[in-house]
């Protein structure tokens, strides 16, 4: 973690506050970006003996949610590079283990009927993404499906010289300096095709952040997003993209005021695809 180009994810503390942030984020993202479905693609049906994988599971919200809607005979795996946030209790058909999405177990080849992976834009470099998609292709069964949820900072349409425009510039600098892909949500369809997947679909949704006129969704969205942006502060300070924590908090406050005036935030994309049978 001492390397100059360490990704922002490495600087996020694995604390109870982070667990609570992830747990609060999950139902919001499910409702607003996934049409309140655990599996977005309605064409997907899981057999009673299906095996399912969640990559970058964090606090395990997605596997725990899926376990409530499928038979106990469905095997559900959640993996992450850190075990700190794994839930202490869960259904017996759910297994958590420490594995990276760029190096999944070799004996998992063609194992999973469905693979889910969400919100790793601040964790994977360009090279990581290429390796990750190769791994997802390898562990998915022929005829199986994958689902990803990622943002695109390129879609962030904000007025010049606004606080949002300044944050977008800082965000883009952060991703450029750490070899991340700032528009990964928009790039993934072609990357999945390049990795060998077929039947690629993409669904775009705006991120609700207007706390004044957006109702409870706007209030929740603003709160969740501010908590996420605060997670990025250590990396921004380290790279000299901001001068101080106080400056950053002032910028966040200005952004919230702009959101309440109707200035939008970035879009999020659900991308789904299938591994060909032959």
Image (cartoon, helix red, strand yellow):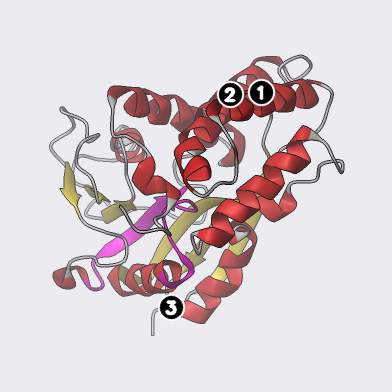
Left or right: 85 in relation to 18: left
Q: Which mark is residue 276?
A: 3
Span colored in magenta: 109-127
Q: Earlier in the sequence, mark 3 or mark 2?
A: 2
Q: Look at the image and tell me whether residue 41 can be seen.
A: no
Nearer mark to the viewer, of 3 and 2: 2
Nearer mark to the viewer, of 1 and 3: 1
Determine which quarter of the picture holds residue 183: bottom right
Where in the figure is residue 268, as x and y percent of width and height?
62, 46
Q: CA distance from mark 3 to mark 2?
A: 51 Å
Number of residues whose C-alpha sits closer than 10 Å to that of mark 1, classed few (under 14), some (14–19) or many (20 or more): few
- SS at mark 1 in the image: helix
- SS at mark 3 in the image: loop
Q: Quadrant of the C terminus?
A: bottom left
Where in the figure is residue 73, as x and y percent of width and height?
18, 45
Q: CA distance from mark 2 to mark 1?
A: 6 Å
Q: Earlier in the sequence, mark 1 or mark 3?
A: 1
Where in the figure is residue 162, as x and y percent of width and height?
82, 36
Q: Look at the image and tell me whether residue 9 can be seen.
A: yes
Left or right: 125 in relation to 260: left
Where in the figure is residue 129, as x and y percent of width and height?
44, 67
Q: Which residue is mark 1?
A: 250
Up-down relation of residue 240 to residue 90 (above or below)? below
Q: Which residue is mark 2?
A: 246
Determine which quarter of the picture holds residue 44: bottom left
Number of residues whose C-alpha sits closer than 10 Å to that of mark 2, classed few (under 14), some (14–19) or many (20 or more): few
| Outermost residue, bottom side | 278
CB within 8 Å, label 2 to label 1:
yes
In the image shown, does 190 or 253 lie closer to the viewer? 253
Q: CA distance from mark 1 to mark 3?
A: 50 Å
């Amino acid at each position: 973690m001492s390397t100059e180009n360490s990704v922002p994810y490495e600087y996020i503390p694995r604390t109870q506050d982070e667990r609570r942030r992830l747990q609060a984020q999950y139902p919001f993202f499910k409702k607003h970006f996934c049409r309140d479905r655990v599996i977005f693609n309605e064409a997907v049906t899981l057999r009673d003996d299906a095996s399912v994988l969640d990559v970058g599971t964090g606090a395990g919200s997605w596997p725990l949610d899926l376990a409530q809607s499928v038979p106990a005979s469905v095997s559900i795996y959640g993996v992450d590079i850190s075990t700190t946030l794994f839930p202490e209790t869960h259904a017996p058909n759910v297994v958590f283990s420490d594995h990276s999405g760029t190096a999944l177990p070799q004996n998992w080849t063609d194992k999973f009927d469905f693979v889910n992976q969400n919100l790793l834009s601040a964790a994977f470099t360009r090279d990581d993404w290429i390796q990750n998609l190769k791994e997802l292709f390898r562990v998915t069964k022929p005829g199986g499906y994958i689902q990803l949820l990622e943002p695109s900072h390129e879609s962030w349409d904000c007025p010049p010289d606004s606080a949002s425009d300044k944050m977008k510039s800082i965000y883009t600098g952060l991703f450029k300096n750490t070899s991340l892909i700032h528009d990964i949500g928009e790039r993934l369809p072609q990357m999945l095709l390049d990795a060998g997947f077929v039947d690629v679909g993409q669904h775009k949704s705006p991120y609700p952040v207007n706390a004044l006129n957006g109702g409870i969704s706007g209030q929740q969205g603003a709160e969740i997003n501010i908590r996420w942006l605060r997670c990025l502060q250590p990396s921004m300070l380290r790279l000299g993209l901001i001068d101080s924590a106080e400056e950053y908090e002032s910028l966040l406050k200005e952004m919230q005021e702009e959101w309440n005036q109707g200035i939008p935030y970035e879009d999020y994309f659900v991308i789904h695809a299938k591994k060909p049978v032959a």
